[in-house]
Image: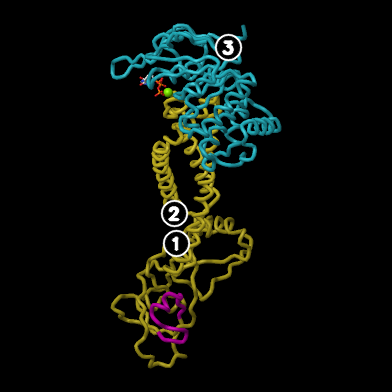
């Protein structure tokens, strides 16, 4: 069995809103192994994003056990969770979240600066990863000068630049047309082929079908695999 | 006792008011022959006000009713040193020979003040001290001492100005913080994204403070530039308005240091107040999910 990156048992997440509780996650048990490609589908509001944020050390569960890259998540300080996000995890969102005042290359370089790489190394890495996503020619362009698909590829480049073991993608094609979404899907598949583990949340069944393990969520829980599923 | 060299100033004794201010008027007609009249020297403003030139005749009296007026010929017109106390006051100055003045005032043997010019100005203090030590009923002051005594009002005014400046900068700070708080939605997003991709609180805070410092430095430079432009407008305009050589606005290094020294800490404070709140929140809330 390959290395276990993330291990979650009985995760729950409650939000208190005006005195009554919303159970965003009820009981989620999940393991993510190195090199795996997992897709998660499910109705809106079933807790997909919430789960992704917890797996990505952005949010903390209300109950349950969570091991992230060999560390007990409950014992991590905020600074340690930040460092996990920097070095082990990459995030891709539906809405890209690039910084509009920086160029594509500068956006991608941010995590490298925080990681303390020397300038030469940073430039090499940025070039390499921008080439990987097919945007080596657009390094100096600002997000506003790029199409949605291109912006998402820049966001993926930024998520990849520190060579994370796990990429978390929350509806990365949600704002893109079909053809552009396809480019992103191919990019994710290539990334998986090159050994990065991916957890992909999507509403697109075709995209979900490309994963090696397909999960469905409902009402804050992962549904048991359907009859006849692999 | 050592010899001291005094050189009496200009046209005999100078009238430095102290008595009833004399009343001057241009003579209606110059019936007497000009050569027979004593001469008087006017300031340029007095001459302009009276509309007289060198060679014209004026009547001067020690009372407003022009009783017992004397006739004088304008022997010269000069521009006095600018005196901040006189800005905006319409004062007419005339300089007479002492006997003429005494006759006009109907007093004898009376001089309130006179100015002595030393051939060695550096000795002023010592000479004044020696005169005072003689105890002959005369008090001697150096011009520096007079200037210091007279400028105390202006020191108070300039302190007052400084206080106004500081208060308006503090008011500006409130305004600045208000703007930054309004702008905070934009900042929230950016800082939230940074936090999400693994940039530490420390780095984010440090970057915000660095930007705040640079912005306030830039603001100070722009402010000082604007101040220089304002000075370049205010001085000539006021000098023309009050017909004086006085400098009305002046940017000293002290003022620059005060402005920059206030602006940068204030910018840092505003940046820190805003950034600290954001950085300690949940990045997911900040990016608006
Ligand atoms: N910060 C929050 N405060 C209160 N409730 C929240 C918060 N975040 C999420 N929720 C609730 O938790 C539940 C799960 O939300 P989540 O965003 O995980 O859904 P999702 O499956 O990602 O939906 P979608 O497909 O629409 O993105 C929802 O009912 C949502 O309203
Ligand atoms: Mg979601």
- Residue under numbered circle 2: B154
Helix, strand or loop for disc 1: helix
Question: How far across and down, in percent of the image, does residue A188 sit?
Answer: 57, 25
Pointer 2 and pointer 1: residues touching (CB < 8 Å)?
A: yes
Q: Is residue B181 magenta?
A: no
Task: Specify few, some or many for label 1: CA neighbours under 10 Å numbering under 14, 14-19, or 20 or more.
Answer: some
Question: How far across and down, in percent of the image, does residue B288 sit?
Answer: 42, 29
Quadrant in which the C terminus of chain B is drawn:
top left
The chain that hosts pointer 2 is B
Above/below status of B3 relative to A154: below
- Residue under numbered circle 1: B84
Callout in the foreground (3, 1): 3
Pointer 3 and pointer 2: residues touching (CB < 8 Å)?
A: no
Q: Colour of chain B?
A: yellow
Task: Give the number of the disc on residue A33.
Answer: 3
* Ligand 2 quadrant assignment: top left
| Gap between marks 2 and 1 measured at Cα | 9 Å
Identify the magenta region. Answer: B40-57
* Residue toward you, A33 or A77: A33
Helix, strand or loop for disc 3: strand
User: Is residue A74 visible from the viewing direction of this image?
Assistant: no
Q: Is residue B52 magenta?
A: yes
């Amino acid at each position: 069995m390959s290395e276990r990156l993330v291990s979650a048992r009985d995760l729950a997440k409650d939000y208190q809103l005006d005195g009554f509780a919303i159970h965003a996650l009820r009981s989620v048990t999940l393991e993510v192994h190195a090199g795996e490609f997992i897709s998660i589908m499910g109705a809106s509001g079933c807790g997909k994003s919430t789960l992704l944020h917890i797996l990505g050390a952005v949010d903390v569960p209300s109950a349950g056990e969570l091991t992230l890259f060999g560390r007990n998540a409950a014992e991590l300080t905020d600074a340690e969770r930040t460092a996990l996000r920097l070095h082990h995890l990459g995030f891709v969102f539906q809405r890209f979240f690039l910084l509009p005042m920086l160029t594509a290359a500068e956006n991608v370089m941010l995590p490298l600066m925080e990681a303390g790489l020397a300038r030469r190394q940073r430039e090499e890495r940025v070039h390499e990863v921008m080439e990987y996503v097919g945007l080596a020619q657009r390094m100096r362009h600002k997000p506003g000068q790029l199409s949605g698909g291109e912006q998402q590829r820049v966001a993926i480049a930024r998520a990849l630049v520190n060579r994370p073991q796990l990429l978390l993608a929350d509806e990365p094609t949600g704002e893109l047309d079909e053809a552009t979404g396809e480019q992103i899907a191919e990019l994710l598949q290539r990334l998986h082929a090159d050994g990065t583990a991916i957890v992909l949340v999507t509403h697109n069944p075709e995209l979900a079908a490309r994963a090696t393990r397909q999960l469905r969520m409902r009402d804050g829980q992962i549904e048991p695999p359907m009859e006849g599923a692999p | 006792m050592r010899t001291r060299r005094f050189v009496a100033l200009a046209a005999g004794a100078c009238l430095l008011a102290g008595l009833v201010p004399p009343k001057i008027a241009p003579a209606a007609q110059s019936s007497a022959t000009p050569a027979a009249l004593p001469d008087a020297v006017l300031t340029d403003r007095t001459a302009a006000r009276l509309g007289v030139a060198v060679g014209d005749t004026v009547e001067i009296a020690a009372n407003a009713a022009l009783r017992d007026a004397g006739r004088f010929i304008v022997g010269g017109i000069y521009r006095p040193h600018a005196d901040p106390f006189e800005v905006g006051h319409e004062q007419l100055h005339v300089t007479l020979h002492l006997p003429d003045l005494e006759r006009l005032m109907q007093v004898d043997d009376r001089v309130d003040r006179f100015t002595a010019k030393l051939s060695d100005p550096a000795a002023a203090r010592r000479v004044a001290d020696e005169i005072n030590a003689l105890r002959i009923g005369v008090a001697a002051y150096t011009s520096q001492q007079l200037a210091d005594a007279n400028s105390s009002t202006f020191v108070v005014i300039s302190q007052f100005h400084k206080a106004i400046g500081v208060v308006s900068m503090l008011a500006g700070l409130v305004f600045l913080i208000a703007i930054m708080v309004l702008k905070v939605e934009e900042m929230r997003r950016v800082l939230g994204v940074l936090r999400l991709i693994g940039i530490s609180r420390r780095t984010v805070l440090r970057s915000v403070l660095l930007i705040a410092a640079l912005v306030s430095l830039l603001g100070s430079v722009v402010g000082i530039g604007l101040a220089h432009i304002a000075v370049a407008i205010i001085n000539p305009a006021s000098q023309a308005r009050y017909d004086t050589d006085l400098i009305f606005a002046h940017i000293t290094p002290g003022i620059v240091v005060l402005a920059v020294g206030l602006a940068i800490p204030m910018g840092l404070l505003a940046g820190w107040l805003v950034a600290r709140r954001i950085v300690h929140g949940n990045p997911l809330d900040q990016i608006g999910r």
